[in-house]
Image (spheres, rainbow, N blue to C red):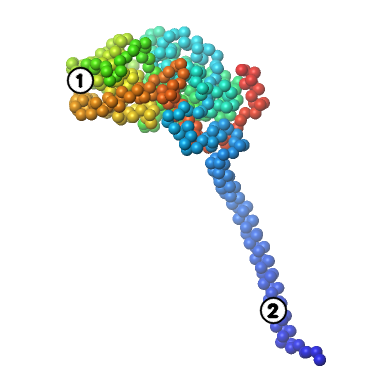
Amino acid sequence: MAKSTSPLLHHSTAATATTAQMKQLLYRRSNSEKSHIYHQLLRKYYRWVLWLFLSVYLFLSSSTPSSFLPSPISRRALSQSPTSSSSSSSSFPSLKIYVYDLPPEFNRVWLSNPRCATHLFAAEVAFHEALIHSSVRAVNPLEADYFFVPVYVSCNFSTINGFPSLHHARPLLSSAVDLISRNFPFWNRSTGVDHIFVASHDYGACFHAMEDVAIADGIPEFLKHSILLQTFGMKSPHRCQEAEHVVIPPYISLGTNRWPAPETAKRDIFVFFRGKMEVHPKNISGRFYSRKVRTEIWNRYGGNKRFYLRRHRFDGYQSEIARSVFCLCPLGWAPWSPRLVESVALGCVPVIIADGIRLPFPDVVPWPEISLTLAERDVASLESVLDRIAATNLSAIQRRLWDPSIRRALLFNPRGIVSGDASWNVLRALEAKLDRRSWRRRRWRPRPSQANLDSWVRWS
């Protein structure tokens, strides 16, 4: 006999089925609404999501070696470990520099005057010669990390006063840049960011001896993206160091003299300075020479027998430095002076009187340990300061100063790059910049295509 089904049970079962269908419908609707909201948010914020994705990608790709990186700079930086040669101060720099072989009117012609290769601005010649004879020189420009533009702008000596005339510097450099940008693809691909110039003048690439004029002129626009090797450096911001740069020592020539070792030299001069000292500080130009510092030195100590001060030129002045305990290095028109390097090379303690000056290679040359710094306003207390040093820690300063590696670090060797010399330290500074700059350069510095190299091949 079949069982009868209760109407209540039928009703309960139907209600359960209806409830399940409603839940399923609501669930589907909920998913649809969620999807709709998700797509709305994605459309609204997709730019931020894309930016975040690219940022993460670039970060990861710049910290992980890759075979498809377009720039030799990036590959070099990524392949170096913390213990590689770039991080070692004693190993030879591993970067490569392509040296443009420019027509002789940009450089070699100027060497007809022997002074071109020996005067205080001759770092532009010495560094060029050192690169040519160095293993750092890249024969293939596609393998280069940097490109050196050898233009000698300091050898146009004035027939009136014998000083270099810099009026031709800007047009000569502009002509060189125009030449390499028309015949080579490397300048245009980076607007010259990986190109190196030497500006070993009073105020670097501002190309003028008077600070007010130099500031008004500024650095030429076409050089502002490049790297400048310049003797001018200040700790505070200055318009003549707005371009990326490396502070280098001025060139000095010790001649053919065989100077005695600094520790064996007889030093019978307590304080020495030979150079321009205006009796009246306001120069014929209408400006105050040396910010009146040299005039005050002359007026205060010119009659002091402990101070060997001379206002006139003498070709054998280096022999006087070699005989001296303290050598004054006051500012002239610019804060730097070749006397700074000459003093170190010949074992005389430099006394730097140039407020805010930034000195070359501070990571290699321990300037606070081998020199004295006196504020320009404190010239009146110069003698008492030197007496106090002579009575206390002079011997410690001299021992550090007489370290041969210190002297070598500030001298250029035109016949090649010697480990630890001035050119070597320039390369170390450039290599450090290479590692810092590679992460942002790889985004826009692709290898030039063969088509882009056609003009370069024809020019070569």
- Residue at x 52%, y 12% (from the top left corner): 105
- Residue at x 57%, y 31% (from the top left corner): 72
Q: Which residue was labeled with disc 2?
A: 16
Rendering coords of residue 198 (x, y %)? 46, 21
Rendering coords of residue 154 (x, y %)? 44, 15
- Please give the label number shown on residue 157: none
Counting other residues with Cα less than 10 Å from the Cα at mark 1, is it few (<14), some (14-19), or many (20 or more)? few
Counting other residues with Cα less than 10 Å from the Cα at mark 2, is it few (<14), some (14-19), or many (20 or more)? few
Residue 334 quadrant = top left
Is residue 91 visible to the viewer in this orientation of the structure? yes
Q: Nearer the viewer, residue 218 or 403?
A: 403
- Please give the label number shown on residue 300: 1
Residue 153 placement, left or right of 314: right
Q: Earlier in the sequence, mark 1 or mark 2?
A: 2
Q: Are marks 1 and 2 in contact (CB under 8 Å)?
A: no
Task: Give the residue type at disc 2.
Answer: Thr
Secondary element type, mark 1: helix
Q: How many marks?
A: 2
Q: Is residue 28 above or below residue 170?
A: below
Residue 409 quadrant = top left
Cα–Cα span, label 1 and label 2: 111 Å
